[in-house]
Image: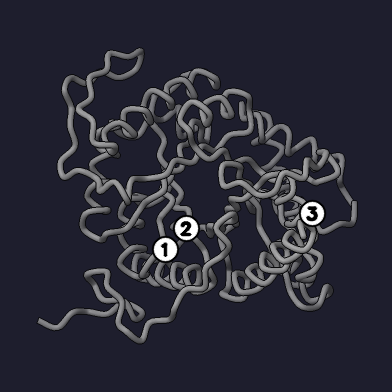
Amino acid sequence: MRELEYHGVTQNGTAPAAALETPELDGSVEVFSACPVSIGASGPTYMSTIWNVARWSERHGCRGILVYADNRLVDPWLVAQVIVQSTRRLAPLVAVQPVYTHPYTVAKMIATLTDLYGRKLFINWVAGGFKHDLEALADRTPHDERYGRLVEYASIVRRLTDGERVTVTGKYYEVQGLALRPPVDAARRPEFVVSGSSPAGAAAARALGARSVTYALPLDDRASTDKGPSLGAGLRMGIIARTDRDDAWRTAFSRFPPDREGALMRQLARKVSDSHWHERFCRLADERAGEGSAFWMLPFENYKTMCPYLVGTHEDVAAELSRYMAEGHGTFILDQPETEADLANAKIAFDKAKGAMATATC
C-alpha cells in the first residue's frame, strides 16, 4: 500500500531522501520554536499549520518545538504525534500540568512516541495555568505547593522513563511496583524543562535536574556574569529580526498594533493572577512604557502574547542575544512564528550572536 506523504514526510514518520538537511546550532545553544495554538482554527487548517511550522522550525535549525496545553486547546500529545510524523529530527517540547492526568499516563505517552518514531521528547513541566482553568478542574492548590506537587509528579515520570520499578507513597501520588512497558531507550530518555520565575519554580528545576526557563528580562535589569551559555538556563522570548531596522519595526507593529481592549484585558489578568512572573512583567511594562530599545513589551502589554520581544536588525538582536548568552543562557524558546521568515531571520541573529561570543573568548 502506498504511504501517504505529508509535506515531504511519510505517514510513518520517515523522510524521503530528497528532504532538506537541517542546519544545527552550536551544542551550547539550543533554540526551540513554538507550535501555534488551536484557538479559532478548524481541524484541517490547523493540521496544515502544524506541519508548516514544524518544517520551518526544523529547516532553520531549531532543536525542538513547544506544544502548549490548557483547557481551550487540542490535546498536546496528539499535536506532538503530528510533529514527529511531519519532520525528521525535531523534538516536541510537550507542556504537562499535573492536574490533567496521572504521571503513569505521561510516562506511557513518552515511551510510546519514542518507541514508534525513534524520537526523543522534551517535557515542559508547568505548575500553574490560567486561574479559571484550574478552578474548573477544582484545583485550588496554593502557588508554591503546586511546585511541590510538580516535583513529586515529575520524579515518578523520571524514574519510570529511566527504567525503574517504582514504589512511592507521597503527599500527592502513590504507586506500588509500577514499571513502564515498552521501556524508553537510554539514548532517547526525555529531557525536562521547568517553566517558572519564582523561587519555588527555580527550586523545582534544581530538584528535578531540569532546564530552568524564565521569561527574558531587559539586560539593564541584571548584571552580566560572562559565564558563557549553558543549556541548563533558558529564556522565553519572541524575535522579529530583519536586515533593515525600519522593516523589522514595521513588521512588529503590523503584527502587534496598540490595542486598548487588549490592554484592559491585561489589567484584568493582572488582578486575578497569582503568577510571580506575570506581576513582575506588568510592573516592567509600566516602567518601560515609551522606552526605545530592541527589548519590546507592547505585545505583552496588549495581551497578544505572554513574552517580550527583541526587535531590530540582525545585529541589534544578536547584540542582545550574545549578552544573554554571556549571562549563562543557552536554551531559548521563541514565540510562535507567523511566517517562515521569522525563523530564518532569527537563525541569522543567533548565528551572529554565537560568532560574537566566539570572538570575545578568543
Front one among 16 and 250: 16
The three-letter code of the residue at mark 1 reads Leu
Q: Relative to 74, is 125 above or below?
A: above
Q: Please report whichever mark, 2 or 1, sits nearer to the chain's N-terminal start.
A: 2
Q: Nearer the viewer, mark 2 or mark 1?
A: 1
Question: Mark 3 near mark 1, Cβ–Cβ under 8 Å?
Answer: no
Q: Residue at x 40, y 70 (%)?
A: 51
How many marks the image carries: the answer is 3
Q: Position of residue 23 (x, y in %)?
A: 52, 73
Q: Residue at x 70, y 48 (%)?
A: 228
Q: Secondary structure at mark 2?
A: strand
| Residue count near mark 1 (Cα–Cα under 10 Å), binned few <14, some 14–19, many ≥20 | many
Can you identify the residue that label 1 sits on?
A: 90
Q: Secondary structure at mark 1?
A: loop
Quarter of the image with the C terminus is bottom right
Can you identify the residue that label 3 sits on?
A: 295
Q: Secondary structure at mark 3?
A: strand
Q: Position of residue 45 (x, y in %)?
A: 40, 71
Q: Residue at x 51, y 57 (%)?
A: 34
Q: What's the coloring here? A: one colour
| Residue count near mark 3 (Cα–Cα under 10 Å), binned few <14, some 14–19, many ≥20 | many
